[in-house]
Every structure is written in C-alpha cells, then in structure tokens.
Amino acid sequence: MASFVSLVTSNQNPTPFAVYDLDTHFQYDANSMVTFVKRKLGDDIISVELTSKQIWACFEEATLEYSKFINEHMAESYMHSALGAATGSLTSANGLLVGPNGLEGKLPRESFDIFIRKAEAYANEAGVGGSIDHFSGSIALERGRQDYSLKEELKTIESGSGKEISVYNQMGLGEYVGDNFLYYDDIPNDPDDPNYELKAKRKQKTKPRIFQVFHFSPQAAYRFFDTTSAVNYLNNQFAFESFTPETVFYVLPVFEDVLRAGQLDISNRIRRSNYSYEIQGGNIRIYPRPTQENPGRLFLRLGFPLNPFDPDVADEKINGVSNISNLPYGNIMYANMNSIARHWIREYTLALCRELVGLIRSKFSSIPIPGSDLQMNGSDLVSSGREDQEKLKTQLKEMLEKVTMSKILENQNNQADQLTNLLKKIPIPNGPIITG
C-alpha cells in the first residue's frame, strides 16, 4: 500500500479535493486512519472492502464537515460584526481556488457599524445626516403669485463665477447650452462626448426629492413674549429665549410654556393664513399668497433618493460581506484543530466508512459458498453508519449552541448571581474600620 505522503510527493492526489493534502498533521494521521477504520470494521477477521483512497476520502469529508460546523457557529455569533468587511482572498493554503477565506478561526472585534448603517436611513429622512448629498437653492418670490416652476426658477450661485445657475445644473441633471438649461434626458447620446459616462449615470437618476422648504411661521415663543424689546428680539432671533432678562417665564413650570406655544400654533392654523406649500410634479405652490411689495426669496433643500447600491458617498462595504456565502471563512486546516476536533473527525470518518462498506456489500445480498450461502450485512452497516453520523452531528450542534456568545454571557451572568448569593452567607469578622 502506497503511503499518503508518497502519493502527495509524486503529485497524485490521495483525496478527491486535495484540501488537506499539504497539511503535515493530516498527512501524519492519514495512514493511521486506514488502520483505525479497518480494525474497527473487523479487518483482522474478515476483509473490509475499502481501499486506502476511499478511507482518505472519508477522512477528508469528515474534516470538511467539522470545519463547516465551526464556521457556521462563528457566523452565528459574529455575522453582525463581519457584514461589509472584505470578502477575503480566493486562494487557500494549498493554492487551490476554493472561495473567500483567510479569517477562519479568528476572533473579530465587536462592531455596531451595521446598526449605525441601518439608522442612516432614518437620518436621511430626518435631514440630520446620512449618505445623501443635499443641494440648496432659492426662488425669487413675487407679490400676489403662488405658483413657481422648480426647473425654471430654482437657482443657486455658481462657485467661482458668481453666476446664477439652475440648481439642477449643480446636481448634474443637465447643462447650459448658451443661456438655455437642457436636461441630459433631452440631449441625444454621443459616445464621443467626454462627459458621456456622467450623463449616462445622471440619466439613471430619478426625480429629485424636496427635503425641506424654509417657509414657516415665526416661533410661538417669539410672539408670546415681549416682541417690542430689542433685547428680547435678539434673544429670540438667536434662539436664546431661555436667557432673556426681561421675561419671567423661566420661573414658571415647563408645561406652561408648552401649552401656551401649542395654543398659539393652533390659533395660527385656524384663525390665520397658515404657512404651507404643495409640490406637484415640477411646480411648487406656497401659502399664504405673498402680499408684501418685495417678498424676498424662498429657500429649498433637495437631493436624490438614496440608491442603495450606488450612494452619493462612496462606500466599498457594499462590495463586502453581505451574507453567509461570502464570509471570508475558508476550510480550517487540520493542523489547527485540537484533540476534541480530531476525535470527532475520527468517529465521523468511521461512520462514513461504515456506510460506504454497507453500500458496497448491499450490491449482493448473499454470496454462494460450498454447501451454503454467505449472508451480507450491507443494509445493517448503512443504517448504522448513517445513525452514527446523525448522532455526531447532533452532539456537535448541541455543544456549539452552548458556547455561542449569547450563551456565554448568560452563563457568566448566572455565575455572578450565584457568587453574590454565596458571598451574602459568608460572615465577615469585625476588623479595623478604614476611613479615607
């Protein structure tokens, strides 16, 4: 019988996938595994119909099975910290392309990045952060006019030139041809255009969203307190209402201010023309109708809805770990496995070999011999081997469930409670009092 090492040296793969062929610990145990399996299956009494390569194949399968369970356990405990991380190298220890690996067996630092990332969606909507670029512009209001075109009249100042341009030009939705602003959607595609890729990308953008319109009534607190005082006026304008020296509201209960502010807001909405607006398509209508001779400008803040795969802020984590299939967990090398793992692998290899022998013997229910028939026990070996495999898998799963991070913390908490209860029952002798 050729040894495992000699086959590897002569470039003959002893195992089907050659995952562990270069692992010296695996090589050392491979020949011993052949002896172990054959003796356990009765080779000294009756020949076991297995070749060394068949046993080594079962040995490799058992090691891969154990590695899979360990990686699943690590994914269950630390998946939230690994999401978005680099998927790892595609090359294993023996140079074979087997998929992302390189971080198996490592203990990652805890990270709440995925939860902060999820919260960004709410920050986007609330306008207090997120991954969306915001643009701002204004519309020159006219007395007695309520309806305005966002496309034609929403302007901003171009950096450098100081020229007034369309906000949609700043957002990259189009460009000026002479004095006319044209959307890229309205410009024919020209592959020779140096900005062809930019224009094609902007054509994929959807309609901009209005995030905030700066059109609202004065704060209720400003109307409630002495608006004729110059000091109080400045305090209100700079949001310093709580520090004004000419009012005494700070000695009142807080709910008093809240109720009065609510009363004034409701009064404004019912008895007066309320400040509001409507956006329909590319137009905006403001309420109430401007009545001043020079009503000023209406400011808006807008941007594109978030594209989850192409946000405005570059994010390489989109190409990182997204699920269990691209976690950078490769096959755990046999050399890195301890005695607990190796004993399980031996038992599982034996169960696989028992099933394999049973399948071989099941081809013939009996073999004729002089004067009788030799009955084969193939079906018994198959069922026994499969039962042993299920038992070993169940034992390993139950053991791993006991050492998940949540279970470890739960056990630590129980131990701390038990220790506290124990210490309560230990009398403490009187001793000298130590004071600071």
Image (cartoon, helix red, strand yellow):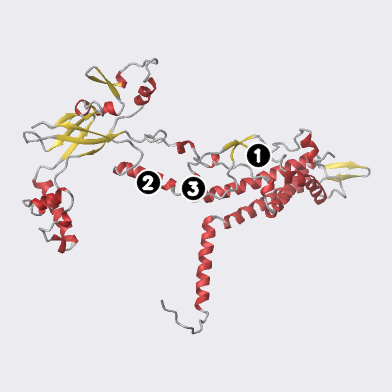
Q: What residue sits 11% from the left and 38% below the top?
A: 288
Residue 395: which numbered mark, if any? Answer: none
Marked residue nearer the N-terminal end (1 or 3): 3
Judged from the image, the secondary structure of the residue bearing numbered disc 2 is helix
Q: Given the current orientation, which residue lies at the most extreme bottom position?
A: 430
Marked residue nearer the N-terminal end (3 or 2): 3
Mark 2, residues whose alpha carbon is within 10 Å: few (<14), some, or many (≥20)?
A: few
Position of residue 59 measured from the top left corner of the image (x, y, whole percent): 73, 44
Q: Which residue is mark 3?
A: 81
Q: Mark 1 touching mark 2, by CB under 8 A?
A: no
Amino acid marked by disc 3:
Ser
Residue 93: which numbered mark, if any? Answer: 1
Residue 219 in sight here:
no
Marked residue nearer the N-terminal end (1 or 2): 1
Q: Which residue is mark 2?
A: 119
Position of residue 357 measured from the top left corner of the image (x, y, whole percent): 78, 44
Mark 1 → mark 2, Cα distance in angstroms: 39 Å
Judged from the image, the secondary structure of the residue bearing numbered disc 1 is loop
Mark 3 → mark 2, Cα distance in angstroms: 16 Å
Mark 3, residues whose alpha carbon is within 10 Å: few (<14), some, or many (≥20)?
A: some
Left or right: 48 in relation to 98: right
Mark 1, residues whose alpha carbon is within 10 Å: few (<14), some, or many (≥20)?
A: some
Position of residue 413 measured from the top left corner of the image (x, y, whole percent): 50, 64
Q: Mark 3 touching mark 2, by CB under 8 A?
A: no
Quadrant of the rendered image containing residue 361: top right
